[in-house]
Image (cartoon, rainbow, N blue to C red):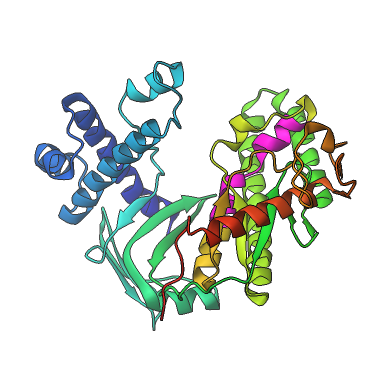
Amino acid sequence: MTRTLWRRPLRACNRAANAASEVAFAKDLKRRNMLQDAVYHRIKADFDLGAQAAVRTVKKVCDAYATLKANIRAANCGPDGSKRRAKAESKPIRFRETSAQPYDDRILTWNLDARTVSIWTVSGRLKGIPFVGSPQALTLLRQRKGESDLVMRDGMFFLIATIDIPEPEVYEPRGFLGVDLGIVNIATTSDGRIMSGRQVNRYRRRRRDLRSTVQKKRTKSAARVMKRNRRREARYANQRNHIIAKQLVATAERTSRGIGLEDLTGIRQRVTARKDQRARLHSWAFAQLGAFVEYKAQRAGVPVVHGDPRNTSRQCSQCWHTHRTNRVTQARFACTSCGIILHADHNGSRNIAHRADAAWQRGAVNRPRTP
């Protein structure tokens, strides 16, 4: 099949979504039933959509406004009265012509034995379309449930399916593995293991230098290169975060411990970095790493506790003395009270482990279900 044939349903659905979004914004119709009554027949006729495709498009618009409302409530779009928040609230949500489109079981049918799908398009329903995937992904597809998304990425088309996997019971941990997240070292555990430091920083430095060089060109080809490099960096960060998260969960599971993490909320606003560290701080997906750890831990039944990150770098993990002079340099911690000397990130991760264990013991987090 040609790319044009796959692009057409995405283009039609997203143009319809933009039309529905304008009505939702102008008439304040953010609820699905109300918006569907107002735009259903129009977008179905004007954009040549099937009945169920029109319904999915309306739901996509309502979900987008619900997400925007949640982000505004959480101050992710800036405080009340800020220009960024005013900009987000002052115009309807727009969808790119290649934005993902949700498909439910009425317009997308999976044949896992034949590894084909039957899918709706604006040219009619297409049957027997082959798909490929890794052996693990094909096995997990047996547990598929709910909608699937048609996604275009780097000129290729993907179907992203939702998998429903039963969760194991969370066990009672025998202590916690503390994890300190940082700029120089992405993650350091309370066992003293430093993960993904020098190699990642070299890569990010190379990409930053390349980005600076390409930006100076100010041409269309330079913009294409920037876009390609941005996606490459995102894939690299995604891969490294998966590897780190998998190692952390495996270590905790093997030693029957839980995982203690810092509360990542507002890390970029909370952390004060030197000028030469700001690019590294803002270029790494800390929230993604935390999300990867959580979902992998959930699948393994490993408890995860988020602790208060304040003073973890200044507090001694041996005697609890807290003072800013304890942090001698970025990498060296020397307590001015008891004299213990540790790697600064190792000391911080030990503090996180202590706080997570204390929170668990006093019942401040959800406990495992009793069999």
Whether residue 134 sits left or right of residue 113 in the image: it is right
Query: Percent x, y for residue 81?
Result: 40, 15
The residue segment tinted magenta is: 277-292
Query: Percent x, y for residue 68?
Result: 35, 35
Say if 312 sits above or below 174 in the image. above
Name the one closer to the observer, 329 or 66. 329
Quarter of the image where the C terminus is located: bottom left
Tell me where residue 193 sits by quadrant. bottom right
Quarter of the image where the N terminus is located: bottom left
Residue 237 visible from this viewpoint? yes
Say if 12 sits above or below 195 in the image. above
Whether residue 68 sits left or right of residue 244 in the image: it is left
Whether residue 162 sits left or right of residue 245 in the image: it is left
Residue 128 visible from this viewpoint? no
For the point 14% across and 43% down, the residue is: 36
Tell me where residue 15 sits by quadrant. top left
